Amino acid sequence: MSPSPPRRAAGRLAVTPSLAPRDLGRPRAPAMAWQARIITLFPEAFPGVLGLSLTGRALKEGRWGLDTIDLRPFGLGKHRNVDDTPAGGGAGMVLRADVLERAIDAAQRGVPDDRAQWPLVYLSPRGRPFTQDMARDWSRAKGVTMLCGRFEGVDQRVLDQYAVDEVSLGDFVMTGGELAAQAMIDATVRLLPDVLGNAASTEEESFSAGLLEHPQYTRPAEWNGLSIPSVLLSGNHAEIARWRHEQSEAITRARRPDLMVKRKPS
Ligand SMILES: C[S@@+](CC[C@H](N)C(=O)[O-])C[C@H]1O[C@@H](n2cnc3c(N)ncnc32)[C@H](O)[C@@H]1O
């Protein structure tokens, strides 16, 4: 018999009936709240940084929910083994398809079949690069399930069978998918309505209009002989907006010419 799904729900009641104990110290998010489900060998890594500041407050207030699905109890034998040696030889270990299958099935209970409504993601350096557009799409879905790899990764057959979307945090290799999951959830959750105090700030920041953000300044007006650009102190909002836009274009052209090429004319 497969084990009951070992979930810890942070901020939301798990959809699946489960005998696993819930952390009753955390409030439950309403059933409609956006939800992240994370399959991981290290559930204790969550909520991690997501439990701090704006995302942490929103989690406590039930504006979004987080469930971790511990991979270990789905493992085989007395030691609950989840991995095995790579077919064809080579270094390291690979997470087994049969173990992952049962964890994914448990995670996906009650989830819409439409992947636009609920993406199923494997964090992977081979994946398509994560972008602000993806964060915005995911924030418009009902939730996301993320599979965190470890060791040399996961058996390819499970990715093919479940048509898993492989997404990368960047062109580097980390030890596991947990940090990537937290980074992507952070970028997504802050776009949910009512999570950031000032929604306008997400419209103006880097990538939202296809440009990098203009330089920011604050008090003191003079620091170490350096002044804030006078236009920002002029009170002329049209001039300030023009200056900021020019700065955004100049910085983007210098640092990320690829973004300028992709940009649609406004
Ligand atoms: C050591 S890595 C495996 C790397 C894999 N053998 C390769 O060369 O592509 C272990 C796990 O960390 C996660 N990971 C590592 N780098 C990542 C990245 N840049 N983006 C997303 N996940 C990453 C993945 O879940 C991966 O399965």
Image (tube, rainbow, N blue to C red):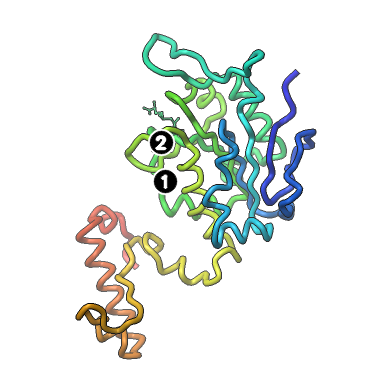
Left or right? Give the position of 207 relative to 246: right
Marker disc for residue 191: none
Identify the residue shown where x is 63% and y is 56%: 59
Q: Outermost residue, top direction?
A: 88
Q: Cβ–Cβ below 8 Å for labels 2 and 1?
A: yes
What residue would you read off at disc 2?
A: 127
- 10 Å neighbourhood of mark 2: few (<14), some, or many (≥20)? some
What kind of element bears circle 1? Answer: loop
Instruction: Inspect the image, locate mark 2, and give the three-letter code of the amino acid beneath it.
Output: Gly
Q: Splitting the image into 4 quarters, where does residue 109 fall?
A: top right
Q: What residue is rendered at 37% in x and 62% in y? A: 206
- Mark 2 CB in 8 Å range of ligand 1? yes
**Rendered position, 184 above or below 163:** below
The answer to whether residue 31 is above or below residue 153 is: below
Furthest-front residue in view?
A: 224
> Residue 219, image x and y in percent?
35, 81
